[in-house]
Amino acid sequence: MKLIKGLLAIALVSLIAVSCKEAKEKAGDAADAATEVVDDAVDTATDAVDTATDAVEDAVDSTAAKATDLKDEAVEATGDAVDAAKEKVKEAVEH
């Protein structure tokens, strides 16, 4: 009877050890899957930040180019206005 109890105890301990080993393997697989999901999320977020950065840089470049064009147009218009004013002053002085 003691021998049977001993064998049953050994079988029970072996069964628990195998169950723990399987649970550990499943937990490791779940951890690996979670790590992969986090890595994918980080990659996606990095790509999104890179895309947003590129868009902002393009907008800044476009705005700077437009500001330069507007400045050049304003300088030209001011020069034209000054020339027109000079002509009017000359005409007024001549008459």
Image (cartoon, rainbow, N blue to C red):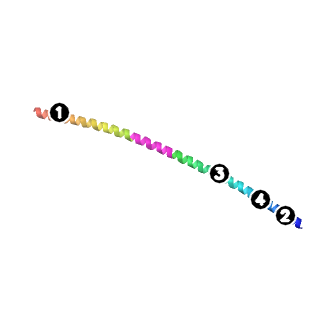
- Per the rendered image, the range of residues in magenta is 49-62
- In this rendering, the answer to whether 36 lies above or below 69 is below
Disc assigned to residue 17: 4
Question: What whole-number distance in Å separates the C-alpha atoms at marks 1 and 4?
Answer: 104 Å
Look at discs 1 and 2 and give the one toward the viewer: 2
Given the image, on which type of amino acid does mark 2 rest?
A: Leu
The picture places residue 40, in percent across and down from the top left corner, at: 59, 48
Image quadrant in which you'd find residue 57:
top left
- Identify the residue shown where x is 34% and y is 40%: 67
Secondary structure, mark 2, is helix
Q: Earlier in the sequence, mark 1 or mark 2?
A: 2
Question: What whole-number distance in Å separates the C-alpha atoms at marks 1 and 2?
Answer: 117 Å
Question: What whole-number distance in Å separates the C-alpha atoms at marks 4 and 2?
Answer: 14 Å
Q: Earlier in the sequence, mark 3 or mark 4?
A: 4
Disc assigned to residue 8: 2
Query: Is residue 10 rendered to the left or right of residue 49?
Result: right
Label 1 with label 4: CB-CB less than 8 Å: no
Mark 1 — residue?
87
- Identify the residue shown where x is 74% and y is 55%: 22
Secondary structure, mark 1, is helix
Question: What whole-number distance in Å separates the C-alpha atoms at marks 3 and 2?
Answer: 37 Å
Query: Is residue 27 rendered to the left or right of residue 94?
Result: right
- Identify the residue shown where x is 70% and y is 54%: 26
Quarter of the figure with the N terminus:
bottom right
Image quadrant in which you'd find residue 27:
bottom right
Label 3 with label 2: CB-CB less than 8 Å: no
Secondary structure, mark 3, is helix
Q: Earlier in the sequence, mark 4 or mark 2?
A: 2
Given the image, on which type of amino acid does mark 1 rest?
A: Glu
Q: Earlier in the sequence, mark 1 or mark 4?
A: 4
